[in-house]
Amino acid sequence: MKQHTMTDSPYGPLTLVAEDGVLCGLYMTDQRHRPQHETFGTRDDTPFAETEEQLKAYFAGELEEFTVELRLTGTPFQRAVWEELRRIPYGETRTYGRLADTLGTPAASRAVGLANGRNPIGIIVPCHRVIGANGGLTGYGGGLERKQRLLDFERGAALF
């Protein structure tokens, strides 16, 4: 059974989605690849207390690594990419190519990018920490401005 809630953030409202009490989605307003609202289940704030507490601490600069339980649903390759994203340290970045190398698929940087773009749990699974080979910002489901703001925030360049 799915439930959802809305929470505020410095990056706009976030929609949190849980399945059987486990976080399976975190979506920004106007996010690319955002599922239809009807798929989020009923509105119920109950399963999200820990997630909201950790997000609040993250946005306050007090938390660098999330520990909430996640349910990442996707192909085996997508799940491998998303798990690798969780290994990128706070305040650091990786290129798509480096992630592909780490996964043992050096020719798959484009596939890594596609999986990155389908990440269902933004911010907590930090797809914003992935950059292009030249060090520049490339696609981000929440928009490049949000990506830059998240990276700046984690690097200490912008405080909220």
Image (cartoon, rainbow, N blue to C red):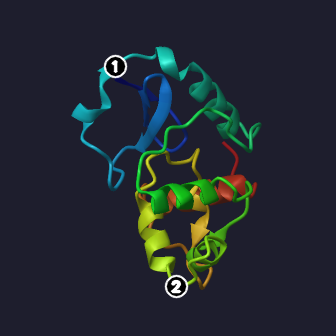
Q: Nearer the viewer, mark 2 or mark 1?
A: 2
The residue closer to the viewer here, 115 or 124, is 115
Give the percent coordinates (x, y) of residue 18.
Answer: 44, 28
Give the percent coordinates (x, y) of residue 51.
Answer: 58, 28
**For the residues bearing labels 2 and 1, Cβ distance under 8 angstroms:** no
- Spatial CA distance of label 2 from label 1 is 42 Å
- The label number, if any, that marks residue 107 in the structure image: 2
Categorize mark 2 by other alpha carbons within 10 Å: few (<14), some (14-19), many (20+): few
Q: Earlier in the sequence, mark 2 or mark 1?
A: 1
Q: Compared with residue 148, is residue 100 higher up or lower down, i.e. above or below? A: below
| Image quarter of the N terminus | top left
Give the percent coordinates (x, y) of residue 25.
Answer: 44, 39
The three-letter code of the residue at mark 1 reads: Arg
Residue positioned 60% across, 54% down in the render? 83
Give the percent coordinates (x, y) of residue 77.
Answer: 48, 63
The three-letter code of the residue at mark 2 reads: Ala
The residue closer to the viewer here, 97 or 151, is 97
SS of the residue under disc 2: loop
Residue positioned 48% across, 14% down in the render? 46
Q: Compared with residue 46, is residue 2 higher up or lower down, i.e. above or below? A: below
Residue positioned 45% across, 37% down in the render? 24
| Image quarter of the C terminus | top right
Residue named by callout 1? 43
Residue 87 as seen in the image, left or right of residue 24? right
Residue 67 as seen in the image, left or right of residue 47? right
